[in-house]
Image: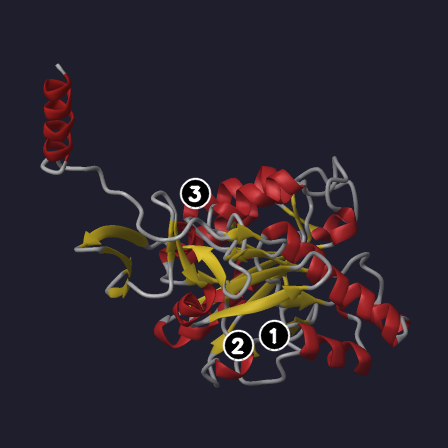
Amino acid sequence: MKKLISFIIIFAVLLSGCVARPLAPIYDQAPTATEKGITIEGKTLSGVYSDGETEYLRLQEFADALGGAVEIAEQENSFAATFSLGEKSVVFTEGKRYDGEQWYQPKEDLMPLLEGYHPFEDAEQNHTYYTAYPMADAVQEGIDVPILMYHAVSDDCWGIPALFVSPKKLEEQLQYLQENGYTTVTFEDFDRLGQIEKPVMLTFDDGYSDNYTELFPILQKYQAKATIFLIYDKLDQLPYYLTREQIKEMDASGLVSFQSHTMTHRDLDTLNEQEQQYELAQAKLELTRLLGKEVFVIAYPTGKWDENTLKITKEQYQFGLLSRGQRYETGRDRAKVSRYYVSRYTTLSEFIDMID
């Protein structure tokens, strides 16, 4: 009986060596999560991981943030992870951690794949935001871009009537743009302006709630882009200003770029340098946290500015916008970008004169 039991045990052991085993991890356990955070183009990863010497990111999360893909395959006594993004493909076999579910790649190996993305460090929250946008000095010079400045879009003129463009008039304007070969752009498009025959920019100051209820449906109908400049301290102040939820929905559409209109909308030329630093730099930080993307354009409230404004703008932002002026030509002072003012009383003929 004992011999039979021994034979069965030996046979089972031999047999087990012939049965195909499921793919099993052959590397160390997963590294430990740290307090560092990372967001790529609005998509927040689970975090930065470490084994005490090296920092890692989860490769699948990294790929998802960039719109790429990851495939993990067994290679003899090891594994390989293939990261692909468009026509680009990278195979990782060294310096990683794989726990059988997540592939952790050293952060330094992945940073070259973020070419064109700019890091913004939030030291207070130990978080880094990577955002793709064109640097002002890299934009092709000499391109005319009519930039139009709006505010509210409504027939309910609860404030200064001139600031409330009629939804019907706005739709007539967008229809004209569509029928006459214009392309609406945002500052994110400035590095490809040379490829666009007739660019035009629509900007909306203050972040009124009708930008969601009235403007957004019109943008969706015509697939037109717009930039909205937010006053941070006004967020969620219904019924007049946009909510965070509305902002995130509009941002996710890809049609709306949100940028800064300072913290409180005070005239900057009446403030000292420290006060302006708060209005411009703190607004940039808070809005970046909200959007998960670095804010890189500022519109000066009522167009007021002084030398401190220009200095801080060039430190914190790529572009600074005035409230009035003529057509903007790329390559000119990036802290004094001019716009045309579109009011409730602007006729279609006047609108056409601004952009033609």
CA–CA distance between discs 3 and 1?
A: 30 Å
Distance from Cα at disc 2 to Cα at disc 1: 6 Å
Residue that badge 3 annotates = 221
Residue drawn at x 54%, y 45% as measured from the top left: 250
Q: Tag 1: residue type?
A: Gln
Marks 3 and 2: CB-CB under 8 Å?
Answer: no
Q: Quadrant of residue 183?
A: bottom left
* Residue pointed to by mark 2: 135
x 81%, y 80%: residue? 308
Quick check: 105 left or right of 77? right
- Tag 2 near tag 1, CB within 8 Å: yes
Task: List x then y, in percent, for residue 181.
Answer: 36, 62
The foreground one among 159 and 29 is: 29
Q: Earlier in the sequence, mark 3 or mark 2?
A: 2
Q: Give the structural element (helix, strand or loop) at label 1.
A: loop
Numbered label attached to residue 318: 1
